[in-house]
Image (spheres, coloured by chain):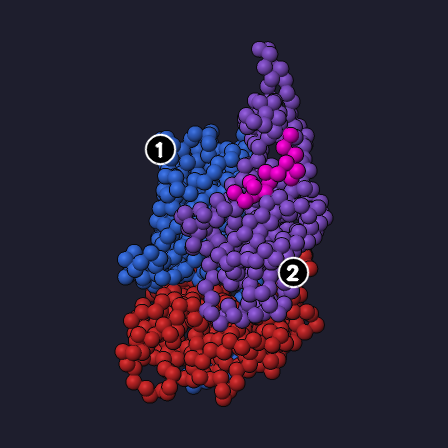
Chain colours: A red, B blue, C purple
Amino acid sequence: MSIDIRLSNEKLQHESTDFSAERPLHLVIPGDIITREAGYMRGHGTYMENDVLYASVAGCVEKVNKLICVKPLKSRYTGEVGDVVIGRIIEVGQKRWRVETHSKLDSVLHLSSVNLPGGELRKRSEEDERMMRNYLQEGDLISAEVQSVYADGSLSLHTRSLKYGKLGQGSLLQVPASLVRRRKNHFHNLPCGASVIIGNNGYIWICPTINEQSDKTGGFVTNYERVNSSTREVIARLMNCATALAENMVVIYDTTLLCAHEFSLKYEVKELIKPDIAKEIALLTKQKIHNNDY
Amino acid sequence: MAAWELLKDQNFRLDGRKPTELRRIETRLGVFPNADGSAYLEQGNTKVLATVYGPHEVKGGRGRSNPDKAVINCQFSKSAFSSSERKTHMKFGRNSSETNQHLVQALNAAVMSHLYARCQIDVYVEIVQSDGSDFCACLNASTLALIDAGIALKDIVTCCSATIVDEKSVVDVNYVEESSGSAVLIVGLLPKDEQIAYMQMKGRLHADHLEKLLDCAVEGCRNINNILKERIGEHLKTHSSHFTLTRPATPGRAERSRPAIA
Amino acid sequence: MDVILSKSEKIFLTHGIEEGIREDGRAPDDYRTIDLELSVVPNANGSSRIKLGNSDVLAGVKCEIGEPDPGRPNEGKIIFNVDCSANAGTEWEGRGGDDLEIEISEFLSKAYSNKSCLDLQILGLIPGEQCWHLYIDVLILRNGGNILDAVSLAVKSALYDTEIPKVLIKMSEKGQSEVELTDNPSDYIIMSTENCPIFVSICKLGKGHVVDATAKESACTMAKIVSAVRKDGMITASQKKCSGSLQESSVLEMYEHCRKVGMELNKTLISKLSEAKNAPIVGFLA
């Protein structure tokens, strides 16, 4: 039995290290003038008034060519075509599922955008419409790709690749979407003995290692076999590492996750949920990533 | 002579402030990680927690949603132990639903709600401790929570109160001054354009005093705004290190194209 | 917060508990870190804030002079009131938290109704006429699982922190007793809270059971037993919750478990309280 009560003032000691000096960031808050120069295009987080470009959110100014955006520290997920996301089915409708992806509006997954069991090129019949709840029901988790973005910002998803589909046993963690980088690959079989899917929407799925050949069935064969305890420990450790990184605003991708995992090994898994240990691991990871300049 | 009369002679207020002096302001952004945005604000002994959920799909059927802009929904409540007299549950009283509407009105002036068509933004405010200017603290905390949630705002709407004590207008009214019976003016300001987004007055006031009082409240708003801006800036600085890492590792298109222009 | 889980997530979580490895690596008997702070609400006679993992609870005690119950003329009264703040999540907006508020405050009243918990005689002033009413207000700011245990820790801590003003009882000219507050604010009485109970919730998931369930674990819980445990292991109230049914043997087993955990939790809390009394107040700024 472990019961640990601490006094609230005990946690004041840690001061976060300042890394911002190395690469100065252009930070703004709502109402700040970004530029008076003409010829820039206004992107997310900005607005134009009398030819002056203002910030509308508190964050970091990013310029790409003539486009100026302000990225807030955190916000709801704004999807882009091609993003990998993890979502939860919240409603089974006619020919489509409604999916919660932590965007401002719910996303949709059309029946025509999923691989049905039995092959990619199968025709969708009325039978399939009736069977929709058998494929995916309320509460189920899926990994998917953003197929298109509607005018109001809501997303249409697809799972037409064997790597996408229903998720089986494992743990889900939610982190701010701003902490997830857009990378080539969001599916990782980590050497420490588990797989992780890092959704662009900030949902992170950690599960037993996915076997390339046999497991990629689009998730329609659900495996309810018991997961062995060593795998469970790895998953729990990765969960706690990812939580530690998120709580201390450290970017999350395979490298940082593995890095945090490595630093965490000197502790027991359950020690990692203690706030000061979590912080230590996050800071060590931050430092290492900065020094190596990934 | 009583101590407070001495203070009065020296142009000091009951709590030792000068007429235009604000109470100490302390803030913290991101108090509750599970919410989209949250903030804690102290204005002297008035202490407020604000939480933002959303923008999210409109609750209670799409009928309530607006195809052009976001629906802002505010709920204000006051904890039973917030004031020296214990009062329970005023969640559904006329007073609190009036406050909710006023908060919605003031926030609507700042939130760029056309960006969040068909969405709902929930703002919940809890007064943990009350010592006057409750509404001001609620609005200021709500603004901070919206900023923490990354919701687009035209400007940082700030709120301040003013009243008249002994013929002099004083700013950021505390509980004792508030209950003295003279008129209290509350102003919510969008400082960038000097637009008044919210105004409320209670009590009797001679028309001649209005300008003076309004000036005093507006000046208070500006000062609070400067403090809040500074605090948000500090928060950004300490929490933005992940941006240096989120930049693409290979030079982005912007950098690569630069030599060509030169 | 209400948590929805898929069937396979539930299976993964439940199997884990049966094997003794929880999602966050804790053993079945482990609590998450508890943060304790006293005197956070200056307008109350006593207050505390407890953070248990992701749950966050504020409790305040206010003393007011009122009339005693006719049946108990020599005793004061304690009145519990729980408020689920909408800050904790959209589902508690409006009247959304009402059911939980009533459930928790009723259970608190039940648990404290045992005479051995608090000496209510100390709250009596003029027999049959005046006594102290202790209003214990609990504000739930965040629900990250196991909210009941967190509430009970906050209540016990707030009572420990409570300073009841000393009063003088004078005879008026008409020969009636009158209560008069002393002018000295440092003149107060403190109640003994050693015997105040703490709630221990034990959740049964599959074949295993755990203490201090997270929000996700609560979502998979089939049956739950909550007991109010005193430091000597005596149980002053108990309640089975959730829809699943239990066998007699597992009820007894869970009871024993509650007792054991409750005694340990009491011991740890009591030892920390005196330290917390003199600690600087940080409140919500850290």
The answer to whether residue C37 shows anywhere in this view is no
Task: Name the residue carrying label 1.
Answer: B208
Q: Which quadrant would residue C19 be assigned to in this image?
A: bottom right
Chain letter of disc 1? B
- State which quadrant residue B44 falls in: top right
User: Looking at the picture, how far across and down is residue A213, in whole percent?
Assistant: 49, 88
The magenta segment is: C106-121
Expressed as whole percent of the image width and height from the top left, the position of residue B238 reads: 57, 63
Relative vertical location of residue C63 with respect to residue C150 in this rendering, above or below: above
Q: Is residue C114 magenta?
A: yes
Residue farthest along the top direction in this orientation? C174
* Residues marked 2 and 1 touching at CB (< 8 Å): no
Please indicate whether residue B169 sits to the left or right of residue A133 in the image. Answer: right
User: Dot 2 corresponds to which residue?
Assistant: C29
Regarding mark 1 in the picture, which secondary structure is present there? helix
- Report x, y in % for residue A3: 67, 57
Residue C21 appears left or right of C268 = left
- Magenta span contains residue C2: no
Q: Residues within 10 Å of mark 2 (few under 14, many from 20)?
A: some
Q: Which of the 4 image quarters holds residue B65?
A: bottom left
Asked if one can make out residue A221 in the rendered structure from this viewpoint, the answer is: yes
Badge number at residue B185 = none
Residue at (52, 46) in percent of width and height? C104
Q: Which residue is more in the foreground, B253 or A291?
A: A291
- What is the three-letter code of the residue carrying label 2? Asp
